[in-house]
Amino acid sequence: MNRTRLIAQLQLDEGFSPVAFWDNDQYSFGFGCRAEKEGDTITEEAALELLKAEAEVAIADFESIYSHCLFKINDARAEALTNMAFNLGKTKLLKFRKMNAAIGRNDWLEAAYQAQESTWYKQVGKRAQRIVRELSTGEKENG
């Protein structure tokens, strides 16, 4: 997995907000990281360091969920799944049972289809579309 490329992709996907705002089920600021409360602030430099730390958590979650089949997952797909782990959290990613079962079988077309059939896909837009294509093809896309 290319961590530098992953961080750059997360920066693009999340965008930067110096002030905390309500984001689905938590306050977020910086590059999509948890804030304590509305109105909390962060500099871009501090936000990048926080993003790097949170990305390591997402990587660990990815490795934990897919430990039984890591050898089957190339860098583009690993980064796509880690991006999902960052966006959703481990608990929600584990709920993608059909997608995860397909990944275990090395059936990437089915995994991509199952991701595309999710509520997450409908909510996240272009990010989800790119991730599904990366799961399907095993090739990294830009933006």
Image (spheres, rainbow, N blue to C red):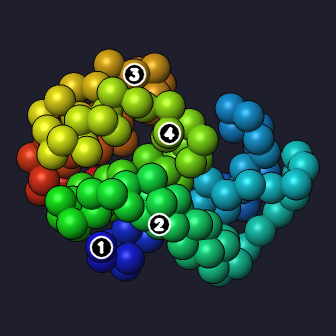
Residue shown at 66%/73% (left/top)? 50
* Residue 1: assigned label: 1
Q: Quadrant of the C terminus?
A: bottom left
Q: Position of residue 20 (x, y in %)?
A: 79, 51
Place of residue 119 in the rendered image (x, y in percent of width and height, measured from the top left): 46, 20
Of the image marks 1 and 4, the number of the one nearer the N terminus? 1
Mark nearer the viewer, 4 or 3: 4
Q: Are marks 3 and 2 in contact (CB under 8 Å)?
A: no
- Residue at 37 percent of width and 79 percent of height: 4
Labelled pair 1, 4 in contact (Cβ < 8 Å): no
- Residue occupied by mark 3: 118
Q: Residue at x 42, y 64 (%)?
A: 63
> In the rendered view, would you say 21 is above or below 140?
above
Q: Label 3's element?
A: loop
The answer to whether residue 11 shows anywhere in this view is no
- At label 3, which amino acid type do we have? Ser
Tag 4 residue: 94
Residue for badge 2? 59
Q: Say which of marks 4 and 2 sits in front.
A: 4
Q: Earlier in the sequence, mark 3 or mark 1?
A: 1
Pick the front one: 53 or 19: 53
Circles 1 and 2, Cβ within 8 Å, touching? The answer is: yes
The picture places residue 41, in percent across and down from the top left corner, at 82, 63
Measure how far apart labels 1 and 2 are at the Cα level.
Answer: 9 Å
Indicate which disc, 1 or 2, sits on the residue closer to the N terminus: 1
